[in-house]
Image (cartoon, rainbow, N blue to C red):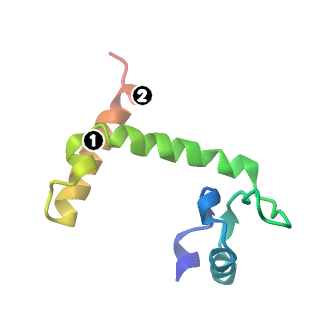
Amino acid sequence: MLDERIDALLADKGYDADTIRAELSAAGVEAVIPTKSNRRVPIPHDREKYRWRNLVERLFSKLKNWRRVATRYDKTKESYLGFVAIASIKLWIPFVHDT
């Protein structure tokens, strides 16, 4: 079920645990997780894919500038996700429209 939705999990060193890696491996999902410095045998990861994590982090940072998104004032999932979509569109418009 997990492998139908995602191909790879991009995570930071905090998620470098054998149980997480085993579950991802069993589901057929690539773990793009750098190893902690205290791991005896480092596990290699795809550095190119890991760079995409930074873009995702920056997107969430920009979305959290909207107080309504950061504090989740909306009561229902639908209205919250609707406002996240509106905020995302407002962030996206300057990149696709020249004024």
Q: Which mark is residue 44?
A: none
Query: In what element is the residue under mark 2?
Result: helix
Q: Is residue 57 left or right of residue 87?
A: right
Gap between marks 1 and 2 measured at Cα: 14 Å
Q: Mark 1 against mark 2, which lies toward the viewer?
A: 1
Residue 10 in sight from this viewpoint: no
Please give the name of the residue rendered at 75% of the width and 55% of the height, measured from the top-left corner: 46
Q: Residue at x 56, y 68 (%)?
A: 6
In this orientation, which residue lies closer to the viewer: 90 or 65?
65
Residue 71 visible here:
yes
Label 1 close to label 2 by CB (< 8 Å)? no
Mark 2 is surrounded, within 10 Å at the Cα level, by few (under 14), some (14 to 19) or many (20 or more) other residues, namely few
Viewport quadrant of the C terminus: top left
Residue 82 sits in which quadrant?
A: bottom left
The residue carrying mark 1 is: 87
Which disc, if any, is residue 95?
Answer: 2
Q: Amino acid at mark 1?
A: Ala
Secondary structure beneath label 1: helix
> At which x and y percent is residue 28?
67, 78
Residue closest to the eye, 54 or 42 = 42
- Across and down, in percent, residue 48 comes to 72, 47
How many neighbours does mark 1 have within 10 angstroms: few (below 14), some (14-19), or many (20 or more)? Answer: some
Extreme residue toward the front, this view: 38
The residue located at (50%, 47%) in the rendering is 56
Q: Earlier in the sequence, mark 1 or mark 2?
A: 1
Q: Residue at x 68, y 60 (%)?
A: 32
Spot occupied by residue 57 in the image (x, y as percentages of width and height) = 49, 45
